[in-house]
Image (spheres, rainbow, N blue to C red):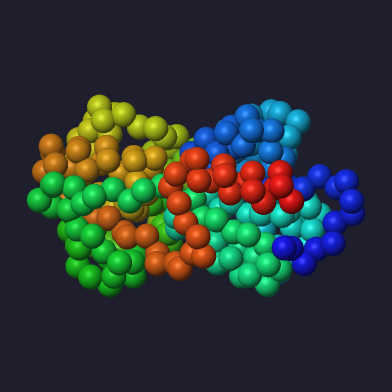
Amino acid sequence: MTTFNYESGTVRRVWLIGGTAESAVLAKAIAHSQIHCVVSVTTEAARLLYPNVATLQVWVGHLNFTNFDEFLYQQQITAVLDASHPYAVEISQGAIAVCQKLQIPYLRYERPVLEEGEGRGNIYLDSFNTLICGNYLENQRVLLTVGYRQLHLFQPWQGKAALFARLLPSGTALEAAFKAGFTPDRIICLRPPISIDLEKALWRQWNISLVVTKSSGKAGGEDVKQKVAAELGVSLVVINRPEITYPQQTSDLAVALEFCCKHVLCT
């Protein structure tokens, strides 16, 4: 039971921590089940991923651990379904902590991890720090498909490797790339999904010899990169997901819906 004392008749909601393709699928299923839900995303563009229905509210903004309590109370949250990006460690850790403090049920919904690819050049590393501190990038033509938040880590390598970045089309991402030393001719902005043919053409256009990606699963296009890397003989560096101990975790949509029904409809 939550420690919040909501007034009788108040609509209880599940908080779906969104921003991923999986969260959009979850939101549609939750809306279809007539479960009241608030989805949190960080950009206005992400709002378009979610259905426009009365039971679903999309909240746009940046949350941090200091205002989680207030957010949960204002939204009358009785359960948290965390479908944030696998690398959004701070958000997940903050949500887990506040749920434990307030005794609110929490469930992590995460895309399955792909099995290691068959390409001979695939390299699996535990962190970006391991990559940066090693010699993996030296004298390589490197395509970074890791998002904009990590680009600053590669700035010291600008003179020792030819670095290219693929980003989402946003001003924030471009600004981060420029600050990290990327020039316009070494940046491309594309919104997934990206086909095998387009992926292959881009790698060939830039004569890429090494690609860096996250272990983002099929939804993040990791399977496509594995296939193209094997076909073109390009080394693929995969940064493994951060290790987090979740109270509960699933990749089953039915389990996630049952969790919402149990803790929202029956509360």
Number of marks drawn: 0
Left or right of 220: which side holds 179? right
Q: Residue 108: x, y in percent?
A: 51, 55
Q: Residue 97, position in %: x, y?
A: 61, 70
Q: Quadrant of the N terminus?
A: bottom right
Dividing the picture into quarters, in which one does residue 228 lie? Answer: top left
Q: Compared with residue 263, is residue 65 higher up or lower down, i.e. above or below?
A: below
**Closest to the observer, 185 or 102:** 102
Residue 191 in the image, given as x and y percentages of width and height: 45, 34
From the top left corner, tell me how far across and down residue 63 is, in percent. Answer: 67, 58
Which of the pair 92/251 is nearer the observer?
251
Q: Toward the viewer: 50 or 258? A: 258
166 sits left or right of 8 in the view: left
In the image, 1 versus 167, the foreground residue is: 1
* Rendered residue at 78%/52% (across/down): 76
Query: Could one spot residue 30 in this view of the protein?
Result: yes
Q: Residue at x 26, y 30 (%)?
A: 196
Residue at 23 percent of width and 70 percent of height: 134
- What residue do we see at 69% from left, 33% from top? 34
Compared with 48, 105 (above or below) is below
Q: Is residue 155 visible?
A: no
